[in-house]
Image: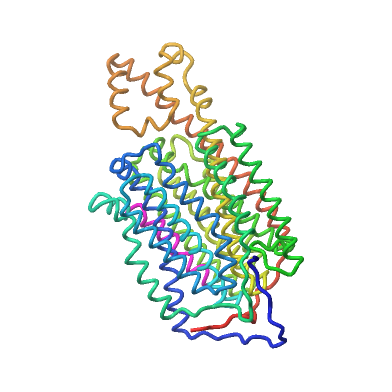
């Protein structure tokens, strides 16, 4: 029982199908709409979480609403990529969006937190196929030299969803019901399904006999789940990084990963097609380096951006809404970077200089973030995010093109899925590792910033309250704290301002520690990319894609 393909005994090369402009246009619209929905779902749910918990009464399970979706969507990415190479993009795309929409409808109808968690798992199983297949569709429609242009255009749907998601989530939750955060996927998804059914070509490699590698799928899932759980639980301080639970999870993931690699290599030597083909990774100078660079960039992306809203609200002093709006220019710069970078790679047919330039822009952005202090303004943050956004957009879109250019057409799906899988792992690792650095660095930095005489004068329980910097964002807590300090008149007011100043300094210093890690990783990324081998982007499509309407 293997997921693979055995070529028919024939020497005839399949004809490369030339798609009509109408077919290409509608297929791209359908794929962009689907990826927009998938990204929108991730951003709107976070806005609705407080109302969901209040309605369904399950605060202890709140983290699982996001965690279970992350787990199921991540582990299914490589599976969808491989199956789309075998069964065709269209059938797997429709299967994924159907599962996603069924999960969305069930989530909206959930009557308990347990039900919602289960239905989010189902929704994630569908979501895991949407982005990798969408990227593979672009590779089927266009030769490598044209892909950069269109990957950049289609990438705009992700950034657009990231912009409107929090706004739509807040509007639906306040004006209608949190259930419409999930129901909104249905009308948009059905439109996309209609476009795909009636217009999209099947896009499959012909002359293939399909056999499913069930054992490989099982090993992949079993190897990925403990890895993601370890990152998630250690990152949110549920367990310590060096606890027996963390070491057990990471150890189990490592052992299962080794078993998966050995098993897959054995299957490939036998001429079967395992769910993960190790031979792709032997192309170290292109495929493997691109994967590592994309993963590191994803770590830096999440590490640099995740704590900025906290910095904006706690240090700069803007509202929650304004801090969210601050990230809109970053998303727009990301779109610009993807589109402009795609145009450049299509025009030149080369990618290494652009890859290095994207990394340099990200380094500049992180260096500018390191300049932010307690006196920073909104403009300072925006200026820092501009080069970072352009570099991120250009680099991540280009990495897909590079990887697809390095593999034959019948491996496009699994190669694309590998890139997105490593990016997803990078984001999980970045959130956990850099989040841990920021959290652990805050308390020492806060205590160091406190004036010694104030530390001696204030009761320990008062100081302990400020060891959680998010207390600044709690209106009720701050009203009580201010009232307590103001009771002592001008001296109390001065003491409170000194403590708040120490909190801001401590938070700034701790977030800076996270930025330092990001800077180190970006310099490492630049060094890795220096070894990237450049193969000119082909102007013709590989043989082996056909339309079966």
Left or right for 325, reference 335: left
Q: Residue at x 29, y 14 (%)?
A: 488
375 w.r.t. 489: above or below: below
Which image quarter: residue 416? bottom right
Outermost top residue = 457
389 w.r.t. 348: above or below: above
**Looking at this view, is 484 or 85 the one in front?**
85
**Looking at this view, is 370 or 38 the one in front?**
38
Outermost left residue = 175
Left or right for 105, reference 335: left
Q: Quadrant where the N terminus lies?
A: bottom right
- Where does the image place residue 217, in percent across and percent down from the top left? 60, 58
123 w.r.t. 346: above or below: above
Residue 532 appearing in the image = yes
Left or right for 273, reference 73: right
- Where does the image place residue 380, in percent across and percent down from the top left? 45, 45
Residue 30 falls inside the magenta stretch? no
Q: Residue at x 52, y 73 (%)?
A: 89
Q: Residue at x 42, y 55 (%)?
A: 329
- Where does the image place residue 36, in percent across and percent down from the top left? 41, 63
Secondary structure predominantly adopted by residues drawn in magenta: helix
Residue 540 appearing in the image = no
Please state the extent of the stretch shown in magenta in the rendering.
Answer: 150-167
Which image quarter: residue 164? bottom left
214 w.r.t. 255: above or below: below
Left or right for 372, reference 105: right
Outermost front residue = 1
**Looking at this view, is 116 or 305 the one in front?**
116
- Where does the image place residue 347, in percent across and percent down from the top left? 59, 75
Which image quarter: residue 286? bottom right
């Amino acid at each position: 029982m293997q997921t693979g393909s055995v070529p028919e005994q024939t020497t005839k090369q399949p004809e490369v199908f030339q798609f009509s402009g109408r077919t290409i246009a509608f297929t791209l619209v359908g794929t962009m709409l689907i990826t927009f929905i998938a990204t929108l779902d991730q951003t709107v749910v976070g806005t609705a979480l407080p109302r969901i918990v209040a309605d369904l009464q399950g605060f202890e399970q709140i983290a699982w609403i996001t965690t279970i979706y992350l787990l199921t969507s991540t582990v299914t990415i490589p599976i969808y990529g491989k199956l789309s190479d075998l069964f065709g993009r269209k059938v797997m795309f429709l299967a994924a969006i159907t599962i996603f929409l069924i999960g969305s409808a069930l989530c909206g109808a959930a009557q308990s937190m347990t039900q919602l968690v289960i239905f989010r798992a189902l929704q994630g199983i569908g979501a895991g196929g949407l982005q990798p297949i969408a990227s593979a569709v672009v590779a089927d429609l266009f030769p490598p030299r044209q892909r950069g242009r269109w990957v950049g255009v289609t990438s705009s749907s992700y950034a657009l969803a990231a912009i409107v998601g929090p706004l739509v989530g807040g509007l639906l939750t306040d004006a209608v019901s949190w259930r419409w955060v999930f129901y909104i996927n249905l009308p948009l998804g059905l439109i996309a399904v209609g476009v795909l059914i009636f217009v999209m070509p099947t896009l499959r490699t012909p002359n293939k006999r399909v056999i499913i590698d069930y054992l490989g799928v099982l090993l992949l899932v079993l190897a990925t789940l403990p890895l993601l759980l370890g990152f998630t639980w250690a990152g949110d301080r549920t367990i310590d990084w060096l606890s027996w639970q963390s070491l057990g999870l990471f150890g189990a993931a490592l052992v299962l990963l080794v078993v998966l690699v050995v098993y897959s290599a054995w299957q490939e030597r036998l001429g079967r097609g395992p769910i993960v083909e190790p031979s792709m990774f032997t192309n170290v100078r292109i495929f493997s380096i691109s994967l590592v660079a994309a993963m590191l960039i994803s770590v830096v992306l999440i590490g640099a951006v995740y704590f900025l809203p906290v910095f904006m609200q706690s240090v700069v002093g803007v509202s929650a809404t304004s801090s969210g709006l601050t990230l809109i220019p970053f998303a727009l710069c990301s779109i610009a970077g993807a589109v402009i970078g795609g145009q450049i790679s299509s025009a030149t047919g080369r990618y290494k200089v652009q890859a290095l330039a994207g990394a340099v822009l990200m380094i500049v952005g992180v260096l500018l973030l390191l300049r932010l202090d307690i006196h920073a303004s909104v403009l300072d943050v925006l200026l820092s995010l501009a080069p970072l956004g352009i570099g991120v957009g250009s680099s991540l879109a280009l990495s897909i093109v590079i990887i697809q250019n390095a593999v034959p057409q019948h491996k496009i799906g699994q190669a694309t899925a590998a890139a997105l899988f490593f990016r997803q792992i990078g984001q999980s690792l970045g959130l956990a590792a850099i989040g841990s650095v920021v959290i652990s660095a805050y308390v020492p930095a806060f205590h160091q910033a406190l004036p010694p005489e104030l530390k001696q004068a204030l009761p320990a329980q008062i100081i302990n309250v400020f060891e959680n910097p998010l207390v600044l964002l709690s209106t009720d807590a701050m009203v009580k704290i201010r009232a307590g300090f103001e009771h002592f008149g001008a001296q109390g007011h001065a003491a409170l301002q000194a403590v708040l100043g120490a909190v801001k300094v401590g938070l700034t210093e701790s977030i800076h520690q996270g930025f330092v890690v990001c800077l180190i990783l970006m310099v490492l990324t630049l060094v890795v990319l220096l070894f990237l081998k450049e193969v000119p982007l082909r102007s013709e499509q590989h043989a082996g894609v056909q339309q079966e309407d």
